[in-house]
Amino acid sequence: MRDLGHIVTTVCPKPAPRWLELWNILRGIPRNRARFATRDNRALVSVAQAGQDLTICSWEPFDALVSSLTGPAILIAHNITSQALPRIFPRNPIAWLLAIQAGRWERRIFRSPQLSAIATLSKRDQDYVASLPGARPVLLTLPGMPPVTMLRPGARVVSDLVLSGTYDWWPKRRDAVRFAKDYARSKNRFPILSDRLPRRATEVLSILPLPSESEASDIIRFGVISDRFESGHKLKTLAYIAQNQIVLSLSDVNEDLSEVLDHYFFVRRVYSVGEIAMHLASISRMDPHVLRDRLVRFQLACAERFNWESVASKLAPTGPGLTAESKSLADNVLV
């Protein structure tokens, strides 16, 4: 947004003390919002808005502060809590009850008059928000792709499995550990490269270090998404593609790639660890030069579709999809 000529000011709400968070939950505020629904945060946002032409509320737990906003504002919902919880914890009745509570909250917040628009990070979330009665206009803001590590002409395919990213969030850690245990019991013996797998996963797997940038330029590998739940947008998918890795995912991550040619070839859904060998074998039988050229075309198409400049343009006060009030030329943006 700064590159577009806007002056961007950032402010970060502070988590509430534990006692206040619990009190907010008892008052009926969803748990992930209760951490930030405080008088101090409302005052912080109110003061920071002075002199701003647009406010962007980025992350749905901050939407508890929407009522404090004045003037044009956009809410970026990284995930839709009511839809995500049942997918992440499908057999947990408490998660379903929390999802119902979150759904009631969302139906109220998403039609707030303080909002000019709501931005989502996936098509699925966009469709859900747009279906809610009275919801504000919805923008699809697919996250940008990391810089592509270009393949060298002689690049070859190697049967390495890469598990990168962070696993601090409990559902991701849970599924990574499940993958490790399933893999250890399987007949697969392909090398696994990682640097942050949970300890319980490394206890049952032999781990090699992640490839350097130079090594990533010489070799086509396979990036594994061990998450079994579908929620929001999988940033890891684009990170793997940028690092010359064919994606093998235990959850369906192809919806947001559906407009990119060859997405089903380079982003493959696997339903069990036992299927991995089949995919590696089919790719390894291909002519490496043909595969390289096809992968490069796919990478460039992804880079064109998934870029932060496009996101900034949609969120900018002069961008498409906003109300007439927020289309006026503006310079100062609060995030």
Image (cartoon, helix red, strand yellow):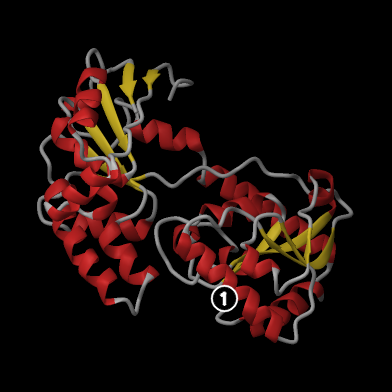
Q: Give the x, y percent position of residue 301.
A: 59, 49
Quadrant where the N terminus sits is top left
Q: Inspect this view and state whether residue 3 appears.
A: yes
**Quarter where residue 155 is shown:** bottom right
Check the image and report above or below for 64 versus 170. above
Task: Give me the residue at 34% from left, 28% from top.
Answer: 335
**Quarter where residue 237 is shown:** bottom right
Asked which secondary structure carries label 1, the reply is helix
Q: Would residue 3 be found to the left or right of residue 200 on screen?
A: left
Q: Give the x, y percent position of residue 72.
A: 20, 28
In the displayed orientation, state which residue is furthest to the top: 51
Task: Give me the residue at 59% from left, 82% from top.
Answer: 272
In the displayed orientation, state which residue is furthest to the front: 19
Task: Give me the residue at 14% from left, 55% from top.
Answer: 26
Q: Would residue 22 be found to the left or right of residue 108 on screen?
A: right
Amino acid type for the residue under numbered disc 1? Arg
The residue lying toward the viewer, choosing from 168 and 283, is 168
Q: Give the x, y percent position of residue 248.
A: 62, 69
Q: Inspect this view and state whether residue 139 appears.
A: no
Task: Give me the residue at 48% from left, 33% from top.
Answer: 309
**Which residue lies under the disc numbered 1?**
178
